[in-house]
Image (spheres, helix red, strand yellow):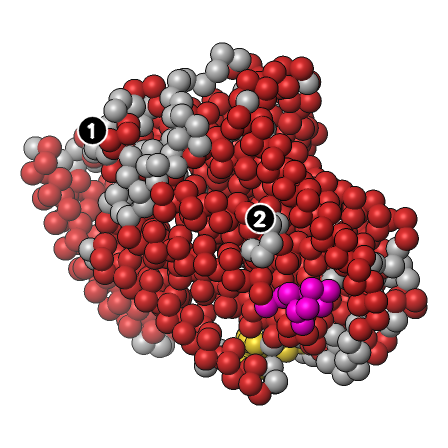
Amino acid sequence: MITLNHYLILSALLFAIGTAGVFLRRNLITMLLSIEIMLNAVNLTFVAVGRYLGTVDGQIITFFVMTVAAAEAAVGLALVIALFRHRETLSPDAFTALKW
Amino acid sequence: MLILIPLLPFIGFVVNAFLGKRLPKSISGGLACAAIVGSFAVALAAVWSVVSSHHAMEQTAFTWITSGELSIPFAFRLDNLSSLMILVITGIGSLIHIYSTGYMHDEPDSEYARYFSYLNLFAAFMLVLVLGASFPVMFVGWEGVGLCSYLLIGFWFKKKSASDAGKKAFVVNRVGDFGFILAMLIIFVTFGTLDIQAVAAAAHSTYTPETAGIGVITAATLLLFLGATGKSAQIPLYVWLPDAMEGPTPVSALIHAATMVTAGVYLIGRCAVLFSLAPITLAVVAAIGTATALMAGTIGLVQNDIKRVLAYSTVSQLGYMFLAMGVGAYAAGIFHLYTHAFFKALLFLGSGAVIHALAGEQDLRNMGGLKKHLPITYWTFLIGALAIAGIPPLAGFFSKDEILWRTYSTEWPAFHLLLYGVGILTAFLTATYMFRLVFMAFHGERRHEAPPAHPEEEEPVAHAAAAHAASAHVAPSTKHGTQHAAPSTQHAHGAHIHDAPPAMAFALIVLAMGSVLAGFIGVPHAIGGNNWIETFLEPAFLAPDAVHEAAEAVHAGASVELMLMGLSVGLAAAGIGLASYFWLRNPAASAAWAQRFSGIHRLLLNKYYVDELYDAAIVQPIKGISTGGLWKGVDAGGIDFAVNGVGLGVRGSSSLLRRLQTGSIRVYAASLFAGAVVVLGYYLWR
């Protein structure tokens, strides 16, 4: 029997993997993909909890999150392309000009 | 109709101020003259209807201030007193505008238009001053003429002495204006109205000279008189007027001789009901006026700048007017104001013609023998000088004698003899210094050596020399393009000297006729006249509901009056004779006397060191307090320190905080994550 806890543990694992990706990888595209994993982990939680509670709220919010994620991905990838054209690299450490 | 009188010059001002740069001289000057002449025509019509109907004319332009019980309409009132004033202002103003078209002709177009716009603005404000029916409206004009005076004194503002003189006039006048404002407040608190006629009626019904005592009326009138001393250049605020001669000469004639400086006299005449209730103030007015007349007369005796002599003469004559006001002879004071406007404007314009002819030369010691080169100027100037000296039957004789006679016949027994004595001494001095001027400028041989070799005792020399240097390129001197203005380099001057051009000659001749004829409206009873001017003006000095009792009782002493008249004419003639001895027949004697009394001579030449005294007593302490206390202490040490301190504090703390902006995405992400963990942790485990 797959219970709510299984879903939550899975989404927590996914979220942790995404977070680790953001912190550890040195490639902007991979970092964006990691953020997508984090968002989807949250989506899974929403859907699972919605199912558990017998409401559709979780699914509705998931749709919102997906919409925002799509927009974010578009903007993020566009920025990444622009940055790449500028510096010929995808390492975030190359883009530290905006500091004190 | 009344509103048109100040409005016409104001329109002239607006047009010349905004479009003048693009207009040729004939149009900008013509427009200004048309505006003031039009105003004169309207004024004549208005005065005619007032005189023929025996009723003051009133007109409200708009409601100016309404607040609670206070309501001040912007109202004009034309009664007998203001009738005389507007005729003087627009009439003499017109002549001076016409004269100016000749005098200022060598200015560039834009400067020419600027000059005429100021002149028109001045006329507009002066007319508001005399037509204003309430104190605030009058005050608008009062401040406006002060502004125009400042602008016109500093007309050649590239010359430092001119812009300094403008500032001095403005600042000194501020002192008097503060008295005017305080007086207005006292009057409003006491009577609840600011309409001059209403105040007069209320004061008349509430007080008598005996009951008024030392109280609000005395305070209010003393403060009004403080305002008058500022505007009319009386002790202690007269110091700005001699310096005001830095302005163009027609300005000196219009503003600093004929009209604006008489505003203080007019103010006292306007508030005659109040002043009559305050005997203490009247005594102060008479004393100050007499002291000023004597002091300025003595200074005028030794000055070497032609315009400065006239300036001190103006101060002295204004002192006469205040003497008349102070002894309650308001009509005599206003009468002298009116005759003085003619002959002093004439003298100033004549000196302007001399300066114009000599390419900016103002030092009397470099003149002489101009009689044959400048016949029109000479004869008109001579008429002016005879008029101011009080030779019958010229205008000055009637008005001056009226003042002296009324001083003599006033009620205070011991005081009046002193006033009379000083007054008649001043009359003698007036004749002397005026004819010193005439003889030095027009008679004898032309002198053109450099100023004498005592520079340390010649305070005005540096001043005048600076004026030459500066006026060589800005003043009317540019007429003689190739001829330099410096006196020592004036070669073959005889050939270059030319008499006044037509516009200037016209004004001189009309004013000379005025100086001869103006006095006949005030021929005293003692010599068979009927003193029409006094009967005409008298109602203006009484409260509206007062019974008009004519001062018939005074005429008992007709024989005494004749005797005093003879005395003053004799003294005037003696003054002329003295002047002719010292400066015409025996010039060496004047130098010898100056040597013998060198202490007094130096004291007079340096104007009793009053400027130096004011500088040491007022200007320097204020500068010291401002520099040491206000600037370096309060401003730099307090305000700037606080403002800079806030800036420094923000900068210091932000230099620590900005270390957080590392630029590394991972650090930002980590701090976000850590923050999220902390917030979540707080909610989970609290």
Q: Which quadrant would residue B321 be assigned to in this image?
A: bottom right
Tag 2 subunit: B
Q: Residue at x 58, y 32 (%)?
A: B579
Tag 1 subunit: B
The three-letter code of the residue at mark 1 reads Thr
Q: Residues within 10 Å of mark 1 (few under 14, many from 20)?
A: few
* Region rendered in magenta: B521-530
Q: From the viewer's perspective, tell me whether residue B530 is left or right of residue B129.
A: right
Which residue is under mark 2? Answer: B388
Where is residue B628 drawn, in percent x and y?
Answer: 63, 26
Inspect this view and state whether residue B377 appears: yes
Q: Residues within 10 Å of mark 2 (few under 14, many from 20)?
A: many
Where is residue B311 drawn, in percent x and y?
Answer: 54, 41
Q: Residue at x 51, y 56 (%)?
A: B515
Q: Which quadrant would residue B40 be assigned to in this image?
A: bottom left
Q: Is residue B315 above or below residue B494?
A: below
- The answer to whether residue B525 is magenta is yes
Q: Nearer the viewer, residue B266 or B336?
A: B336
Where is residue B161 drawn, in percent x and y?
Answer: 45, 32
Disc 1, disc 2: CB below 8 Å? no
Q: Nearer the viewer, residue B258 or B411?
A: B411
Q: Residue at x 52, y 62 (%)?
A: B517
Q: From the viewer's perspective, tell me whether residue B49 is left or right of residue B279.
A: left
Q: For marks 1 and 2, give the one nearer the viewer.
A: 2
Where is residue B96 drawn, in percent x and y?
Answer: 40, 55
Which numbered tag is attached to residue B482?
A: 1
Check disc 1 and report its element: helix, strand or loop: loop
The three-letter code of the residue at mark 2 reads Ile
Q: Residue at x 75, y 57 (%)?
A: B562
Task: Check chain identity for marks 1 and 2: say if they share one.
Answer: yes
